[in-house]
Image (tube, rainbow, N blue to C red):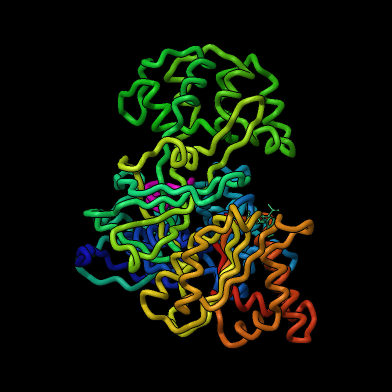
């Protein structure tokens, strides 16, 4: 696509001078690439305003550069319950420490990406925003907290920021159009061209209807786990992906839950509602469009506003330390039952949040399965408040989506969780439970492309007999030499728990040797316990095998992360 011509305006000399003094930096901290993408959108807007922003990755940003910034736009996501992305860890830590410099000359704004289903939604962006102000920085505009769909909001926010930046600069003398502009800030006062039309792609507004070709229960009878292997067709979509990417699946709420919500709200199925200028009946809205199976703080806040008689809701919201515990395991039907109010279908729809798609690490390689995408999905089921609960999207795929039916999907690139660029590089893959999914894709891809690097997988699950996911495939890869080593940790096959990190520690020397010779190390799966335990094991291995102390090991791991040889896809 050719770049549209920019009707640029040359700066008046005085302005050009002022402008040359101020640089615009867009600094992003990204885990999967979304913040990088958002930073790119902001940069694109800035260029349309005639600016030449520097787009920089926090991962490679020397902390000493902070002092030199004058106009800084921070774009950062939050991982899980309030953690910065790996690439932002160092800058974040530095900024929050007492070593951080005063920043009296800084003007800044923060764009925070997050996921509203977590309580600590956009926490990292919040912390950057607070701390930059504490250090003397002045906010250009209020921080924007974006949920998983961020593109439109990001573009709007960028316009707001750029308008503000333009206001801060003295007005230029009007000059003839057509002159190329190379100065930075304050040289142009309106977007020169309209945003280019986005390339045709599948996304939340334009999902691809993928036919389910196959659904197989991977666990044996009597297992505590319920894991499905799903194969979707991408035929005629043009959709592509790489190992390490994720597939977004748009769930539908289960009919039983929709009925429970309707009953708890005393509303008729056909009550009319408007959602984004669209007329729907309430049943359709509750099934297709609105989140029912998890309760989030924003929903509780809006509900409190229409239920003033329930002072208890306001107490719950005010009790910050216990809010998470209250929300956990509750759904919209629980809320409506616990705090009944009289409301219309439209009011209910306005209280609820949009039903977001869920991301699954892709379990297949396109090279091995042309025009298909495979997932490994664990059905989430539990009981709280005396009611059976089901994960919205895992339940949809496990119980409702039948072979031959279509699910709405699109691909979410994970820019960093990728195979090494050099096919000769050794890889260690730690993937217990459904964390094994992307490694099936990795090994398939490497087998198809004839990569020569060694592939080592560490897998764990409760029991060998019922939970050895993709057992025959791994055995075939071992036989063919496309898998060099497979270490298994069946945690409950003996009285003492054995986990993947124990297997790593048993192979301490081998792990260290592979890292020393340039190998990559991947972890996928449970974030809260497994991933941190695996990191601890790795630190112990580095200490033990190098003969150095804990500081050395920490620095070694830090360097692995910086060079993106230690990579996580954890949830
Ligand atoms: P457990 O449930 O028997 O404790 C996939 O869920 C596998 O990861 C299971 O075998 C589970 O063991 C295991 N697991 C649980 N906690 C873990 C941890 N902290 N580190 C590594 N594996 C863990």
Asked whether 87 falls inside the magenta stretch, the response is no
What is the span of residues highlighted in magenta in the rendered image? 147-161
Residue in the foreground of this view, choosing between 140 and 383:
383
Q: Is residue 308 above or below residue 350?
A: above
Q: Answer whether residue 565 is visible to the viewer in this image.
A: no
Quarter of the image that includes the N terminus: bottom left
Asked whether 151 falls inside the magenta stretch, the response is yes
Q: Position of residue 233 (x, y in %)?
A: 30, 52
Dominant SS in magenta: helix
Residue in the foreground of this view, choosing between 351 and 365:
365
Compared across the picture, whether 387 is left or right of 408 comes to right
Quarter of the image that includes the C terminus: bottom right
Q: Position of residue 312 (x, y in %)?
A: 70, 21
Residue visible at 37% across and 47% down?
152
Compared across the picture, whether 223 is left or right of 410 comes to right
Q: Position of residue 434 (x, y in %)?
A: 54, 55
Q: Is residue 202 above or below residue 172?
A: above
Q: Answer whether residue 221 is visible to the viewer in this image.
A: yes
Q: Is residue 359 above or below residue 30?
A: above
Q: Position of residue 480 (x, y in %)?
A: 45, 77
Judged from the image, the quadrant occupied by ligand 1 is bottom right
């Amino acid at each position: 696509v050719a770049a549209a011509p920019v009707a640029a305006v040359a700066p008046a000399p005085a302005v050009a001078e002022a402008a040359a003094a101020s640089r615009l930096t867009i600094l992003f901290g990204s885990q999967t690439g979304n913040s990088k993408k958002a930073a790119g959108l902001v940069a694109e807007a800035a260029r349309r305003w005639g600016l030449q922003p520097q787009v920089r990755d926090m991962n490679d940003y020397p902390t000493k550069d902070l002092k030199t910034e004058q106009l800084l736009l921070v774009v950062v996501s939050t991982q899980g319950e309030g953690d910065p992305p790996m690439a932002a860890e160092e800058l974040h830590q530095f900024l929050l420490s007492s070593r951080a410099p005063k920043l009296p000359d800084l003007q800044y704004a923060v764009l925070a990406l997050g996921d509203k289903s977590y309580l600590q939604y956009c926490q990292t962006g919040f912390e950057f925003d607070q701390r930059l102000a504490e250090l003397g920085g002045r906010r250009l505009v209020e921080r924007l907290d974006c949920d998983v769909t961020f593109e439109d909001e990001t573009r709007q926010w960028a316009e707001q920021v750029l308008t503000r930046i333009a206001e801060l600069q003295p007005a230029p003398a009007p000059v003839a159009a057509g002159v190329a502009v190379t100065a930075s800030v304050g040289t142009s006062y309106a977007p020169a061209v309209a945003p280019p039309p986005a390339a045709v792609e599948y996304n939340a507004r334009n999902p691809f209807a993928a036919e389910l070709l196959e659904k197989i229960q991977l666990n044996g009878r009597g297992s505590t786990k319920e894991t499905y292997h799903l194969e979707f067709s991408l035929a005629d979509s043009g959709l592509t992906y790489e190992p390490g990417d994720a597939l977004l699946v748009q769930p539908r709420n289960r009919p039983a839950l929709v009925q429970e919500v309707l009953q708890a709200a005393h509303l008729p199925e056909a009550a009319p509602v408007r959602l984004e200028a669209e007329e729907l009946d309430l049943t359709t809205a509750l099934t297709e469009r609105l989140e029912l199976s998890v309760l989030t703080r924003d929903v509780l806040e809006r509900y409190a506003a229409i239920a003033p008689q329930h002072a208890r809701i306001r107490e719950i919201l005010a009790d910050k330390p216990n809010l998470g515990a209250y929300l956990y395991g509750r759904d919209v039907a629980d809320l409506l039952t616990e705090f009944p109010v009289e409301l219309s279908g439209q009011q209910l729809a306005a209280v609820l949040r949009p039903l977001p798609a869920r991301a699954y690490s892709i379990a297949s390689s396109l090279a091995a399965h042309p025009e298909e995408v495979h997932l490994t999905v664990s059905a989430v089921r539990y009981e709280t408040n005396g009611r059976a609960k089901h994960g919205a999207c895992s339940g949809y795929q496990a119980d409702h989506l039948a072979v031959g039916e279509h699910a709405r999907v699109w691909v979410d690139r994970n820019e960093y969780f990728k195979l090494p660029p050099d096919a000769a590089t050794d890889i260690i893959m730690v993937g217990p439970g459904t964390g094994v999914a992307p490694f099936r894709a990795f090994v398939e891809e490497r087998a198809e492309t004839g990569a020569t690097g060694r592939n080592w997988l560490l897998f764990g699950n409760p029991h060998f007999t019922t939970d050895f996911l993709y057992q025959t495939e791994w055995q075939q890869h071992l036989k063919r030499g496309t898998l060099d080593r497979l270490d298994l940790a069946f945690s409950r096959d003996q009285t003492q728990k054995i986990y993947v990190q124990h297997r790593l520690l048993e192979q301490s020397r081998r792990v260290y040797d592979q890292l020393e010779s340039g190998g990559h190390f991947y972890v996928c799966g449970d974030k809260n316990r497994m991933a941190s335990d695996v990191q601890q094991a790795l630190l112990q291995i580095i200490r033990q095998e190098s003969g150095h102390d804990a500081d050395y090991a920490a620095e070694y791991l830090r360097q692995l992360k910086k060079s993106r040889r230690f990579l996580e896809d954890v949830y």
